[in-house]
Image (cartoon, rainbow, N blue to C red):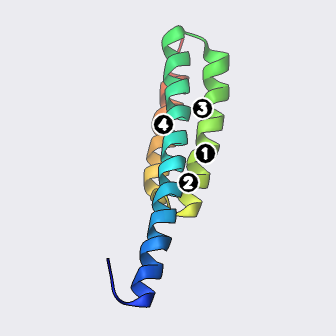
Amino acid sequence: MANIKSQKKRIITNEKARQRNRSVKSSLKTATKKVHTAVEAGDKESALKFAHDACRTLDKAASKGVIHKNQAANRKSGLMTLVNEMS
């Protein structure tokens, strides 16, 4: 444990941010998984709905700095490509 007061505060702040980021990343994985499950089931309508929800979640995560904006863009592109390739 640190002896410096500001470092002690920093440790607490970093832990809070880590927990928050972990929660957001978990919700990203869940949203992405919903899209993949709908695509595997062959349900284009629900896959498109879940893809829009996932895109919104990715944008929020990027705006909060949890993931990089380019990573969010790449993931959104991949999801939409997956949905649009459905017959």
Give the label, 3 or 1, closer to the camera: 1
Using the image, tell me which numbered label, if any, was put on residue 3: none
Labels 3 and 1 touching (C-beta < 8 A): no
Q: What percent of the width, then of the height, locates residue 24? A: 54, 49
- Measured Cα–Cα span from mark 3 to mark 1: 10 Å
- The three-letter code of the residue at mark 4 reads Lys
Report helix, strand or loop for mark 4.
helix
Question: Which one is earlier in the sequence, the residue at label 4 or at label 1?
Answer: 4
Q: From what the image shows, is residue 41 above or below residue 8?
A: above
Which residue bears the numbered disc 1? 57
Q: Residue at x 49, y 27 (%)?
A: 33
Question: Which one is earlier in the sequence, the residue at label 4 or at label 3?
Answer: 4
For disc 3, the neighbor class at 10 Å (few under 14, some 14 to 19, many from 20) is many
Give the label, 4 or 3, closer to the camera: 4
Which residue bears the numbered disc 4? 29
For disc 2, the neighbor class at 10 Å (few under 14, some 14 to 19, many from 20) is many
Which residue bears the numbered disc 2? 61
Report helix, strand or loop for mark 3.
helix
Using the image, tell me which numbered label, if any, was put on residue 51: 3
Horizontal relation, residue 85 to residue 47: left or right: left
Q: Quadrant of the C terminus?
A: top right
Q: Quadrant of residue 8?
A: bottom left
Labels 1 and 2 touching (C-beta < 8 A): yes
